[in-house]
Image: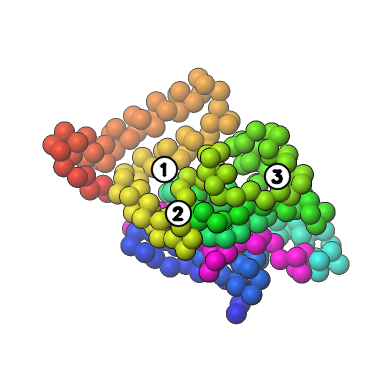
Amino acid sequence: MAAELRSTFEGSTMVLTISNPEHRNALSPEMYAAGVEALNVAETNAEVRCVVLTGEGDTFCAGGNLQRLLANRQKAPEVQAQSIEGLHNWIEAIRTFPKPVIAAVEGPAAGAGFSLALACDLIVAARNAVFVMAYSSVALSPDGGGSWHLARALPRQLVSELLLGGERIGAQRLHELGVVNRLCDAGQALATALAWADRLGARAPNVLASIKELVNDTGAHDLPTHLAAERDQFVKNLHHVNGGIGIAAFLNKQTPRYE
């Protein structure tokens, strides 16, 4: 079967499934491009409220295809650089996408697969899921923003352990550290993520977009700049039609239906 990124819909949630079962859902440049395109489509589709990223079967993603990387050693360095740029375009698209993105992780999430999960806003993982940045085990360094995300989520010593030694870390440990949001039984990651997506999808989409933007910008803002951004987002959302719907529903003890 050809490697592909499948796009399907479950209610108001777009599900992106990494499908390359013969190679443990290893990634390819075609998947990177498909991921960016899918998010572009979802961004302009008002009926899509959330996106869930998952892998086919009992593996989330094995990362890069080592056979392809070995072949790229015989080509100009620009070939691999362009491939990594494709991955990075997908990572940036996930981070800047104005709707929640949830990773539903079963089994291994390795290398760029781990990086993809870290780029998502939320992570649901089966209790037996395992995360690993195995780059140094094959004499490579990280890509996909993995070192960036880990360095902002975990103590430097632990990040160094994971990256320098290619150490495996379980979903339970990452849950204790606050990187994984929800644990579930094996085989239930997608269902758990979809249920969470449904709950998020019932909230005002303009507010979710504002929150995601504020969270993403914290690293680049000093406090006065961030306070100004919070002020501007608050005023914009108060005067949005959904602001009126939400406040009125709360005061009248009704369930809001946002536009």
Q: What residue do we see at 65% from left, 62% from top?
A: 62
In the visual, does 5 lie left or right of 190?
right
Badge 1 or badge 3: first in the primary sequence: 3
Q: Is residue 212 above or below residue 139?
A: above
Q: Which residues are magenta?
A: 47-69
Q: Is residue 164 above or below residue 62?
A: above
Q: Quadrant of residue 129?
A: bottom right
> Which class describes the residues within 10 Å of circle 3: few (<14), some (14-19), or many (20+)?
many
Number of the front mark, 1 or 3: 3
Residue marked by disc 3: 162
Query: Nearer the viewer's eye, disc 1 or disc 2?
Result: 2
Mark 3–mark 2 contact, CB under 8 Å? no
* Quarter of image, res 204: top left
Q: Nearer the viewer, residue 89 or 155?
A: 155
What's the image's color scheme? rainbow
How far from the left and from the top, in percent, is residue 34? Answer: 56, 64
Q: Which residue is mark 1?
A: 209
At 65% across and 33% down in the image, what residue appears? 155
Say which residue label 2 marks: 184
> Which residue sits furthest top?
224
Tag 3 secondary structure: helix
Label 1 SS: helix
- Label 2 neighbourhood size at 10 Å, few (<14), some (14-19), many (20+)? many
Q: Nearer the viewer, residue 167 or 71?
A: 167
- Which of the two residues, 97 or 144, is positioned nearer the viewer here? 144
Q: Earlier in the sequence, mark 1 or mark 2?
A: 2
CA distance for labels 3 and 2 = 23 Å
Residue ranking furthest to the bottom: 1
Whole-number angstrom distance, CA of label 1 to CA of label 2 = 27 Å
Magenta-drawn stretch contains 121: no
Residue type of the residue flagged with mark 2: Cys
